[in-house]
Image: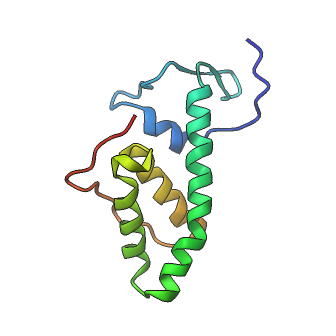
């Protein structure tokens, strides 16, 4: 299989799909250059979705900071709580990755993110 896709999925996102033993949940394989191959289209598309969502949330987070003036950490926790709901379309680990990436894009300190007690993982 010749994979011409140039999208590099970072190790931090691959970790979302990795179990405690370091095995990937999905049938994900990498080639010698570390690019995803095989049935990796799903991971690649989830990465693109999560990266895009983090980028779109930048302006929203900045607006919340300037309008409501809660702390940066509180804004990130609220966004995380919203993303941890089943209706968001992302899993709890993906929600955590999105908010961590959002904090990075904003150059904010990312707080510890704990899923809500009633959070459901959506697959």
- The structure residue drawn at horizontal position 49% and vertical position 54%, both measured from the top left corner, is 98
User: Where does residue 78 sit, x and y in percent of width and height?
Assistant: 37, 68
Query: Residue at (67%, 21%) from the top-left corner?
Result: 31
Q: Which quadrant, please, contains the N terminus?
A: top right
Left or right of 11: which side holds 115? left
Residue 66 to residue 11: above or below: below
> Looking at the image, which residue sits at the far front?
87
Q: Is residue 57 left or right of residue 23?
A: right
Please state which of residues 83 and 101 is positioned toward the viewer in this rendering.
83
Q: Is residue 107 visible?
A: no
**Which residue is depicted at the point 62% across and 26% down?**
41
Residue 79 on image: x %, y %: 42, 64
The answer to which image quadrant residue 8 occupies is top right
Image position of 43 with respect to 68: above or below: above
Closest to the observer: 12 or 47?
47
Count of numbered badges drawn on the protein: 0
């Amino acid at each position: 299989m010749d994979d011409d896709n140039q999208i590099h999925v970072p190790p931090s996102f691959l970790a979302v799909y990795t179990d405690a033993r370091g095995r990937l949940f999905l049938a994900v394989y990498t080639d010698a250059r570390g690019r995803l191959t095989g049935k990796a289209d799903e991971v690649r598309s989830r990465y693109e979705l999560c990266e895009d969502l983090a980028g779109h949330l930048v302006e929203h987070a900045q607006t919340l900071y300037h309008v409501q003036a809660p702390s940066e950490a509180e804004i990130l926790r609220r966004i995380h709580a919203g993303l941890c709901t089943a209706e968001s379309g992302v899993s709890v680990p993906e929600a955590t990755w999105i908010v961590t990436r959002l904090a990075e894009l904003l150059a904010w300190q990312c707080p510890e993110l704990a899923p809500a007690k009633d959070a459901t993982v959506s697959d």
